[in-house]
């Protein structure tokens, strides 16, 4: 059964993630995707509900994830402290403490948050999660789609489309 959770960003335990090193160790990339994350509510844990709630910290010059949008999950960011730039389909937008950003689960919700300041950017990220279905995110800049469910996680180029009955 899900229980009420109270968490404070000031006392949260953060884990560092470096996506560049995780996916392609030692390779140079256009941007550094590195962050500190503290999960308040993880729907992949038994009894945790349907919301993913996390505190993130982006150090200066870092981004959270490549520019993407989800096909199943909606996201809300609340900027707790700091400032940065949010890349959107409508261009880059300045964001700062107190801003609330709502991203729908479609291409108009495409986003990438970048800390363009000289101080840490701290934000709350709340995502809807449907544990009964796989999730997918589209990466418009690189022409990829990533699909995941449980331990299965695969990325494909959108240009590699196959006929549904090919090989059948």
Image (cartoon, rainbow, N blue to C red):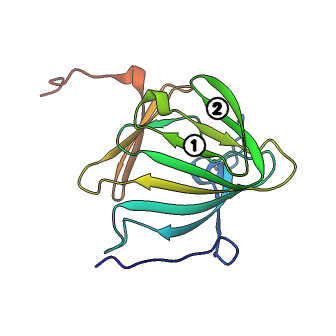
Residue lying farthest to the left in this orientation: 168
Q: Residue 84: x and y, percent?
A: 75, 42
What residue does disc 1 label? 101
- Circles 2, 1 touching at the beta carbon (< 8 Å): no
Label 2's element? strand
- On screen, residue 160 versus residue 87, left or right, reads left
Q: Is residue 114 above or below residue 108?
A: below
Q: Is residue 52 above or below residue 109?
A: below
Tell me if residue 127 can be seen.
yes
Q: Residue 17: x and y, percent?
A: 63, 59
Q: Is residue 59 above or below residue 90?
A: below
What residue does disc 2 label? 87
Q: Residue 34: x and y, percent?
A: 68, 52
Q: How many marks are shown on the rendered structure? A: 2
Q: Residue 92: x and y, percent?
A: 69, 28
The residue at 49%/39% (across/down) is: 103
- Quarter placement of the N terminus: bottom left
Q: Nearer the viewer, residue 113 or 148?
A: 113
- On screen, residue 69 versus residue 94, left or right, reads left
Tell me if residue 28 can be seen.
no
Q: Nearer the viewer, residue 118 or 16?
A: 118
Q: Distance between the Cα atoms at labels 2 and 1?
A: 12 Å
């Amino acid at each position: 059964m899900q229980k009420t959770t109270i968490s404070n960003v000031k006392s949260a335990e953060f884990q560092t993630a470096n996506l560049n090193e995780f996916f392609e160790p030692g390779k140079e990339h256009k941007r550094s995707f590195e962050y500190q994350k503290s999960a308040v509510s993880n729907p992949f844990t038994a009894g945790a509900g349907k919301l993913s709630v996390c505190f993130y910290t982006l150090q200066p010059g870092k981004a959270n994830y490549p520019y993407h949008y989800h096909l199943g999950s909606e996201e809300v960011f609340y900027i707790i402290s700091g400032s940065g730039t949010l890349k959107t389909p409508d261009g880059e937008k300045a964001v700062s403490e107190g801003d609330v950003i709502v991203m729908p689960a479609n291409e108009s919700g495409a986003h990438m948050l970048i800390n363009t300041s000289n101080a840490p950017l701290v934000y709350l990220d709340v995502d809807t999660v449907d544990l009964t279905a796989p999730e997918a995110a589209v990466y418009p800049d690189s022409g990829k789609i990533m699909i995941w469910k449980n331990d299965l996680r695969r990325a494909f180029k959108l240009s590699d489309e196959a006929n549904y009955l090919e090989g059948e």
